[in-house]
Amino acid sequence: MCLPEQFQVADVERVCAGVSWATISRALRELGQIECVRGGRDALWEKQSS
């Protein structure tokens, strides 16, 4: 999946059409290499460099 350095859940939903919000949320938590930089309805996530 190719996402920009900063992305929103809506971006992931577009790339992974048909995947539930619960699954996306769980995957984001489990990845551990991303950080929520702005919470709320329009939350913004950012990839963290290794």
Image: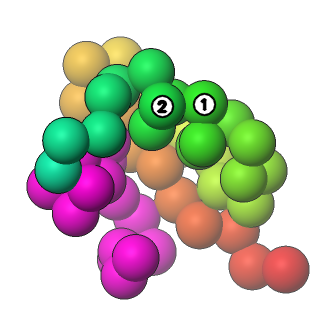
Residue ID at (27%, 56%) = 16
Amino acid type at mark 1: Arg
Q: Is residue 35 above or below residue 50?
A: above
* Location of mark 2 (residue): 23
Q: Rounded to the nearest whole Å, what is the CA distance between mark 1 and mark 2? A: 5 Å
Q: Which mark is residue 9?
A: none
| Left or right of 22, for residue 2 | left
Can you tell which mark lies on residue 26?
1
Cβ–Cβ under 8 Å for marks 1 and 2: yes
7 drawn magenta: yes
State the extent of the magenta-drawn residues as a range. Answer: 1-16
Q: Is 23 in front, or is 41?
A: 23
Query: Which quadrant is the C terminus positioned in?
Result: bottom right
Give the left or right position of residue 39, taking residue 47 as reference: left
Is 48 included in the stretch rendered in magenta? no
Label 2 secondary element: helix
Residue shown at 17% from the left, 50% from the top: 17
Question: Which residue is outermost to the front?
Answer: 18
